[in-house]
Amino acid sequence: MRTNRRSTSSAEAGGQAGEAASFGSSFGLSITDAQYKKLAQLVYRLCGINLGDSKKELMKARLAKRLRATGCHDVRDYIRNLESDASGTELVCFLDCITTNKTDFFREPQHFDFLARDILPKLDKLCGPSAPFRLWSAASSTGEEPYTLAMVLKENQQCWQRRGVKLLASDLSTQVLEHGRRAVYTMERAACIPRALLTRYFQKGRNRWEGHVRVRPELREIVEFRRVNLMDPFKFDHPFHVIFCRNVMIYFDKPTQERLVHKFHDCLAPGGYLFVGHSESLTGIQHRLAFVRPAVYRRENK
Ligand SMILES: C[S@@+](CC[C@H](N)C(=O)[O-])C[C@H]1O[C@@H](n2cnc3c(N)ncnc32)[C@H](O)[C@@H]1O
């Protein structure tokens, strides 16, 4: 679901290719070039995702699910349904099905080590003497990233306990936000959580929840899930000290990335950090952030 092939993470690209290749799921659905173009333009206009000309098969695979859910006969019928839905409900479902939500606990773990080792011990300098430490997971998907942040915070509670902490987790997709709020994961998904942390911060499911774990309340209460479309203007009461926006900018074209990074700059506190995915360098776009280390940038201290 992106045009800049060089920066696609291989796992993500592999997943999409596999999905598009499994034709069983699109049931021979046909989509004309004009219909594809119309839907791709809608996706670009509403959420910045640049499908380009080459994601027709992927679009088909994902649309097939919406056609089944809405009872539409074909893509023409579906587009008519989408256009006549004044409530906007189907539009939200359509965008939900188009987004790629691949994520993991402790994905790109160096970022969490850097947070624990280099940022948390110096919060007085970053936040001032008493302000709460504010973090934002800006494309949180199903919650693995913000709950990983919450675990790192809990493990280093002495660094922020006095001042408090606020952790916002946001995404465009309502479905993934709901999953994050529910905070239930299969054991398979939880496999990359170190055992001691799994025991400390997760409850084991029983009976119908056998094979699942649920994030314990003390971790859940740190995270606030909210729908934010990164294409919209941001308005927050207080600046953030840390923003994680990882593995979503790869879906945006350069001008969209540039606008987004400017907006992040403006809602970071002086000295605040922006983390991007390791396959998403800011090279080639104009921005006012200082490079700290690969995939970590910082707003100047003024
Ligand atoms: C591949 S996941 C990345 C999740 C997590 N940050 C990580 O690195 O593991 C990308 C997420 O970005 C979200 N997304 C895509 N376009 C968006 C937009 N315009 N505004 C907010 N979220 C968006 C998708 O719904 C998806 O959950």
Image (cartoon, rainbow, N blue to C red):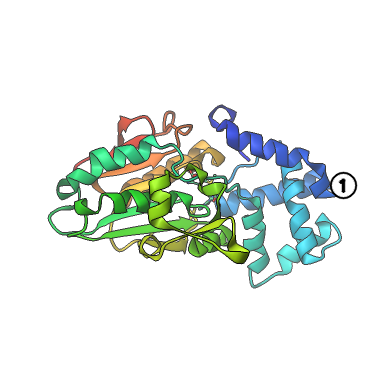
Q: Is residue 31 visible?
A: no
Label 1 secondary element: loop
* Whether residue 290 is situated above or below residue 140 in the rendered picture: above
Q: Nearer the viewer, residue 49 or 41?
A: 49
Q: Which residue is label 1 attached to?
A: 28
Question: Residue 98 appears at what percent x and percent y?
Answer: 65, 51
Quadrant where the N terminus is found in the figure: top right
Q: Residue at x 45, y 33 (%)?
A: 278
How many numbered tags mark residues here?
Answer: 1
| Tag 1: amino acid | Gly
Question: Residue 298 appears at what percent x and percent y?
Answer: 29, 39
Q: Residue at x 51, y 44 (%)?
A: 191
Question: Residue 239 appears at what percent x and percent y?
Answer: 28, 55
Q: Nearer the viewer, residue 233 or 160?
A: 160
Query: Which image quadrant is residue 16 in?
Result: top right
Query: Would you say 43 lies left or right of 202 here?
Result: right
* Whether residue 13 is situated above or below residue 271 in the rendered picture: above
Mark 1 is surrounded, within 10 Å at the Cα level, by few (under 14), some (14 to 19) or many (20 or more) other residues, namely: few
Query: Would you say 38 lies left or right of 131 here?
Result: right
Query: Which image quadrant is residue 22 in?
Result: top right
In the picture as drawn, the residue positioned furthest to the front comes out as 207
Question: Residue 19 appears at what percent x and percent y?
Answer: 72, 42
Q: Is residue 117 visible?
A: yes
